[in-house]
Amino acid sequence: MPGIDECLLDAMRLPGARGAALVDWTSGLALGVVGEFPGGDAEAACAESAELARLAAEHKTFAPDGGPGEADPPVEDLLISNLDAYHVLRFVPTSFDSTVFLHVWLGRADGNLALARIRLGELAGRLVLG
């Protein structure tokens, strides 16, 4: 079972990966970062992505049909695309209150969004925190 550093290095093996981070969405703090991030500031990118993750996780609109409390976290992942990149935010289920997610930045020209979702799901399931 991989820890944070190994998980992030595995994420960087995805085609087109530019940067990866494990982020606490309640505080916006990075628990680990590897690679580069837009604007050259990984801490700012983590804080900004945490705001988006928090909005998705806390609103009932995005909860499973069973309503709040059915899943923890209630959202699997968020996908953001722009002209040259994909950002994949994968929520990590934990034995404690799940407030962390993996954020991977992929170059659009050589990134594979479907593969990234599959691999990040596997990594999130195996990640050992604590």
Image: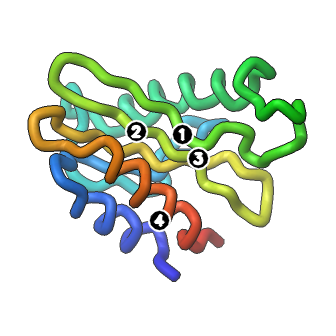
Which mark is first along the chain, 2 or 1? 1
Question: Residue 5's image quarter?
Answer: bottom left
Question: In the image, what residue type sits under mark 4?
Answer: Leu
Q: Name the residue tied to disc 1.
A: 77
Q: Quadrant of the C terminus?
A: bottom right
Helix, strand or loop under label 3: strand
Where's residue 125, x and y in %?
Answer: 58, 66
Helix, strand or loop under label 1: strand
Tell whether label 4 touches label 3 (CB within 8 Å): no
Helix, strand or loop under label 2: strand
Q: Name the residue tied to disc 2.
A: 88
Disc 1 versus disc 3: nearer the observer: 1
Which mark is first along the chain, 3 or 1? 1
Tell whether label 2 touches label 1 (CB within 8 Å): yes
Tell whether label 3 touches label 1 (CB within 8 Å): yes
Q: Distance between the residues labelled 1 and 3?
A: 6 Å
Q: Distance between the residues labelled 2 and 4?
A: 13 Å
Question: In the image, what residue type sits under mark 1?
Answer: Asp
Tell whether label 4 touches label 2 (CB within 8 Å): no
Q: Name the residue tied to disc 4.
A: 123
- Residue in the image at 36% along x and 62% along y: 8
Where's residue 129, x and y in %?
Answer: 61, 69
Q: Residue 91 carries which label?
A: 3
